[in-house]
């Protein structure tokens, strides 16, 4: 696809469908641009709003292809997805012929499959990144053919060829990393609880938190404030429920400027998506985790165990948790500054603040090795 200029790298990034896939990709692209400002970045993803709207905010060019997921589909849906695959690969081919990437970097999600596979057929250097403790279907299959596999958590290494593995951690966006370098501003006298339901299954977390807050006394509620990300479907219902609870609250369907919210947060109640956990770890935020029980291969619970085992998180299975138990846990942590600090320190111990840099180094090394191999083959 042409010689590699040491100052100008063209990287095609593919994946998405959820913020958990997209934000590490954005963080990696930002690091490429920080190191080599002339780097050209193109995202290839789905037409889902989370992909197109988020990328527009960060200023990256993007294209989409027609593609459907394969895992867990009914027969007719599976047949449709398989029928579309050749067209998906052709669309990816057209994009690559036009953009001429030096490397294709995949971050998971079903769109990653046809794009990375097409890149491999064209002889383009390929690297994938897995955020979760249990790799998704696309990454599991692609691990056999790509040049390098970047991993966030040790548990996922068993399913990939050991010679291809590079442990990098899960990159977080530059705006969040900057919080770790900035001086602490004066904190709100009230303790702030941040509630994150995740992109899937937010409703159960929303209800549990509301039930928990309903058990608090007026005095307890007066000493705290809540920032609650509900997900689009649950926004109005949760807003209505809070009208009967005397607490200072900021309810939003989705928080775009997470760094501004994280800065004031004392305690987090959250699902256990890999990217959210990476952000909380880098910032040292104590967290109560309620993994999404229907996540593929139960990967959220396994993600959560990694941080809970170190003492940075308290883990509850959704079917074992009540509003009362959650309320007791939240209040005991808000009252205990020492315990929260210990949890914060434990979260930081399992963080990878240099993850994006490690991925960039891995990609550059893969390009160099691939170019060297091509040169040897021509001789």
Image (tube, grey):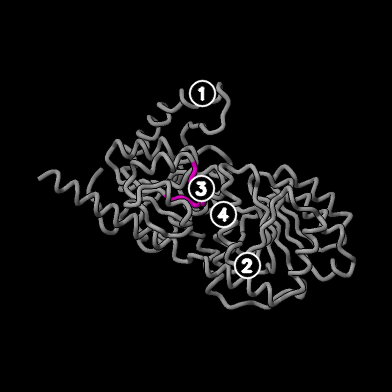
Q: Which mark is residue 186?
A: none
Q: Mark 1 or mark 3: which comes first in sequence?
A: 1
327 up-or-down from 138: above or below: below
For marks 1 and 4, the one nearer the N-term is: 1
From the top left corner, tell me how far across and down residue 315 is, in percent: 66, 58
Where is residue 218 drawn, in percent x and y?
90, 66
Span of residues in magenta: 129-136
Closer to the camera: disc 4 or disc 2?
A: 4
**Cβ–Cβ under 8 Å for marks 3 and 2:** no
Alpha-carbon span between mark 1 and mark 2: 43 Å
Q: Secondary structure at mark 3?
A: loop
Badge 4 is on which residue?
Answer: 303
The number of numbered badges drawn on the structure is 4
Q: Quadrant of residue 195?
A: bottom right
Q: Residue at x 44, y 58 (%)?
A: 30
Q: CA distance from mark 3 to mark 2?
A: 23 Å
Q: Which mark is residue 285?
A: 2
**Numbered tag placed on residue 80 in the rendering:** 1
Q: Nearer the viewer, residue 4 or 292?
A: 292
Q: Earlier in the sequence, mark 4 or mark 2?
A: 2
Label 3 sits on residue: 134
Nearer the observer: mark 3 or 2; the answer is: 3
Looking at the rendered image, the quarter that the C terminus falls into is: top left
Which quarter of the rendered picture does the N terminus lie within?
top left
Residue 135 located within the stretch drawn in magenta: yes
Asked whether the beta carbons under mark 4 and mark 2 sit within 8 Å of each other, the answer is no
Please determine whether, in this image, residue 88 is positioned above or below residue 173: above
86 in relation to 112, above or below? above
């Amino acid at each position: 696809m042409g010689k590699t200029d040491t100052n100008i790298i063209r990287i095609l990034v593919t994946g998405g469908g959820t913020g958990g896939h997209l934000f590490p990709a954005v963080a990696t692209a930002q690091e490429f641009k920080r190191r080599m400002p002339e780097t050209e970045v193109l995202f290839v993803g789905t037409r889902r709003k989370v992909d197109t709207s988020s990328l527009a905010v960060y200023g990256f060019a993007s294209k989409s292809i027609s593609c459907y997921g394969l895992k867990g589909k009914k027969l007719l849906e599976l047949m449709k997805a398989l029928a579309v695959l050749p067209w998906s690969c052709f669309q990816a081919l057209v994009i690559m012929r036009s953009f001429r990437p030096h490397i294709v970097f995949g971050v998971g999600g079903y769109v990653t499959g046809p794009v990375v596979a097409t890149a491999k057929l064209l002889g383009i250097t390929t690297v994938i990144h897995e955020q979760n403790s249990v790799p998704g279907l696309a990454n599991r299959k692609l691990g056999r053919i790509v040049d390098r596999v970047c991993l966030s958590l040790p548990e996922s290494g068993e399913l990939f060829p050991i010679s291809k593995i590079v442990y990098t951690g899960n990159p977080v966006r530059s705006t969040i990393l900057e919080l770790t370098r900035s001086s602490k501003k004066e904190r709100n006298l009230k303790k702030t609880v941040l509630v994150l339901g995740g992109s899937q299954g937010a409703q159960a977390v929303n209800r549990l938190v509301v039930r928990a807050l309903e058990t608090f006394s007026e005095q307890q509620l007066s000493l705290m404030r809540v920032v609650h990300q509900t997900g689009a479907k649950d926004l109005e219902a949760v807003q209505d429920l809070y009208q009967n609870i005397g607490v200072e609250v900021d309810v939003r369907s989705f928080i775009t400027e997470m760094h501004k919210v994280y800065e004031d947060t004392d305690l987090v109640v959250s699902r256990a998506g890999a990217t959210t956990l990476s952000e909380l770890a880098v910032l040292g935020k104590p967290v109560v985790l309620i993994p999404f029980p229907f996540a593929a291969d139960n990967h959220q619970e396994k993600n959560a165990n990694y941080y809970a085992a170190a003492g940075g998180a308290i883990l509850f299975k959704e079917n074992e948790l009540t509003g009362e138990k959650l309320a007791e846990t939240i209040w005991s942590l808000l009252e205990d500054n020492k315990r929260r600090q210990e949890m914060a320190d434990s979260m930081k111990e399992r963080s990878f603040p240099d993850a994006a840099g490690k991925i960039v180094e891995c990609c550059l090394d893969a390009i160099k090795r691939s170019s060297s191999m091509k040169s040897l083959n021509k001789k």
